[in-house]
Amino acid sequence: MKTKKHKKKILGELIKEKVKDSGLTVEEFAEAINSNRSTVYSKIFTCKDCDINTSTLILICKALKYNFFKELNINFEGIEETKNKSVFLIEMEDDEEFNKICNDKSIKIIYSQKLST
């Protein structure tokens, strides 16, 4: 008996599908991620896993209200395993609270970006 192999969609295909499902036009989606229609078609809808920079993917997640990070198939081979540590993606609206976190010696800020709203 033959079994069908499930081919995982590339990230760009999934984003394109979610844009269509959202009811946004490509132009509206492009504006929401600070881009343009041409770039969306040429760089985003055709991308494979990990070809979109993190800040752009965060904007895409917010625009489409979907966590695309969970869809990434990332191979962490060769990266040292750490125990009792967690990595979080946090959105904060209060700069003062963020500054408190930055001063906490038990927290290491790996990446930070201020997003425009």
Image (cartoon, rainbow, N blue to C red):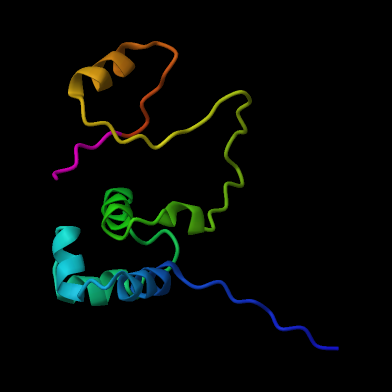
Question: What x and y, as percent, mark residue 88?
Answer: 44, 34
Is residue 84 something one can see in this rendering?
Answer: yes
Image quadrant holding the C terminus, namely top left
Residue 8, above or below 109: below
Residue shown at 46%/71% (left/top)? 10
Residue 47, above or below 102: below
Question: What x and y, as percent, mark residue 82?
Answer: 60, 28
Q: Report the magenta residues as a range.
A: 112-117
Number of numbered discs on residues:
0
Q: Quadrant of residue 2?
A: bottom right
Indicate left or right for 65 with 96 as reference.
right
- Tell me, yes or no, whether the highlighted magenta stretch contains residue 71: no
Question: What x and y, as percent, mark residue 43?
Answer: 27, 70
Residue shown at 16%/68% (left/top)? 28
Is residue 72 something one can see in this rendering?
Answer: no
Question: What x and y, as percent, mark residue 49?
Answer: 45, 63
Indicate left or right for 81 with 9 as reference.
right
Question: Which sits in the foreground, 81 or 71?
Answer: 71
Image quadrant holding the N terminus, namely bottom right
Q: Magenta-highlighted stretch: main secondary structure?
A: loop
Q: Quadrant of residue 97?
A: top left
User: Among all residues in the image, which is located at the extreme bottom?
Assistant: 1
Question: Which sits in the foreground, 42 or 68?
Answer: 68
Q: Quadrant of residue 14?
A: bottom left
User: Among all residues in the image, which is located at the extreme front?
Assistant: 23
Residue shown at 33%/17% (left/top)? 101
Residue 33, above or below 82: below
User: Among all residues in the image, which is located at the extreme right?
Assistant: 1
Residue shown at 19%/71% (left/top)? 39
Residue 45, above or below 116: below
